[in-house]
Amino acid sequence: MFQVDDCPGNGAATILAIVSATMIEHLVTRYEAARLELHQRELRRREVAAIARLGEKTLAEGGTRSGRLAALAAESAKARGQLLSAKSAQGASSSAGARQRLGALEQKLHQIHLTAGRLALALPPTGAESEVHAIRAEIADAESERDRLRGEGHRLIEETWTRVRSWIVPRAPALIAMVLGWLIARSYAVSHTGAIMSSVGLSPTRRGPHLVSLTGDTLLVQYGLALVVAALAAYVAHRVAGRVRTAVETVRERSSQATRVAGVARNPE
């Protein structure tokens, strides 16, 4: 994390550097979290495929089929026979209806395998389900890392806001005075550009003396003067606010001391 003390001074440039560094770190964190989320989706697709393979393998093991698995084995055999027939029929006919029937049968067989795989996962382990458990472990790791990155992103935002606020709050009067000074001075300079230029011996027209040119002098009056006034207003407001804070702290300290003295006087022991 970018530190305030790493930059010389505690000015606006320092705050901008902190905010910029935090934005970059936050974007990188968001990118990594998004990448992990995409990876999780791919892992979940792999998990579904692994469960279907587990179900297909379980149904193929005749000795371990019983109850619901036996019924699914019968459904699977029937669907597989229909699928083979549909594939043979598709060889003779490539119509859209034949392709649609083939796709529906493949989806049905896939759902049967998924159901059988989920049932097999609920049975005592045999080792065949190790692929599914390995993928689920990867999903859990990816989810944990994604949550950590999201938490890190929120922490970066909170820390940056705390630093920015700690810089802004003591300088709030100066910043407000600077903005107000800029608005007032800019408005006045724009509406009285000619008079201001004439008062300092510059010509408000193309003819006559110019410091730079008519355009340059106009910009100096309208923007340069406003900047100077804004800077002076900020400086004065900062000094006044500092004196007020010092006076308030002095009064509070004296009041605290008086309270302590009064407490000692009431309870000399």
Image (cartoon, helix red, strand yellow):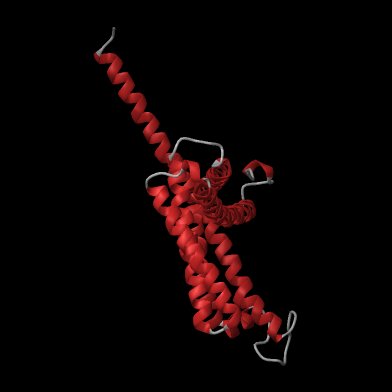
Residue that protrudes farthest toward the top in the picture: 269
Q: Position of residue 266 (x, y in %)?
A: 24, 15
* Pick the front one: 105 or 8: 105
Residue 262 in the image: state x and y as whole percent: 28, 20
Q: Position of residue 106 (x, y in %)?
A: 51, 66
Residue sitting nearer the eye, 22 or 224: 22
Corner quadrant of residue 223: bottom right
Quarter holding residue 28: bottom right
**Residue 146, visible in the rendered structure:** yes
In the picture shown, does residue 262 fall above or below 181? Answer: above
Q: Quadrant of the N terminus?
A: top right
Q: Note whether residue 157 is visible.
A: no
Please tell me whether residue 182 is drawn above or below residue 255 in the rendered image.
Answer: below
Residue at the image position 55 percent from the left and 55 percent from the top: 49
Answer left or right for 20 relative to 158. Answer: right
Residue occupying the point 63% across, 71% down = 224
**Residue 87 drawn above or below residue 28:** below
**In the foreground, 76 or 166:** 76
Q: Is residue 33 above or below residue 125?
A: below
Judge left or right: residue 18 versus residue 113: right
Q: How many marks?
A: 0
Image spot of residue 122 (x, y percent): 43, 41
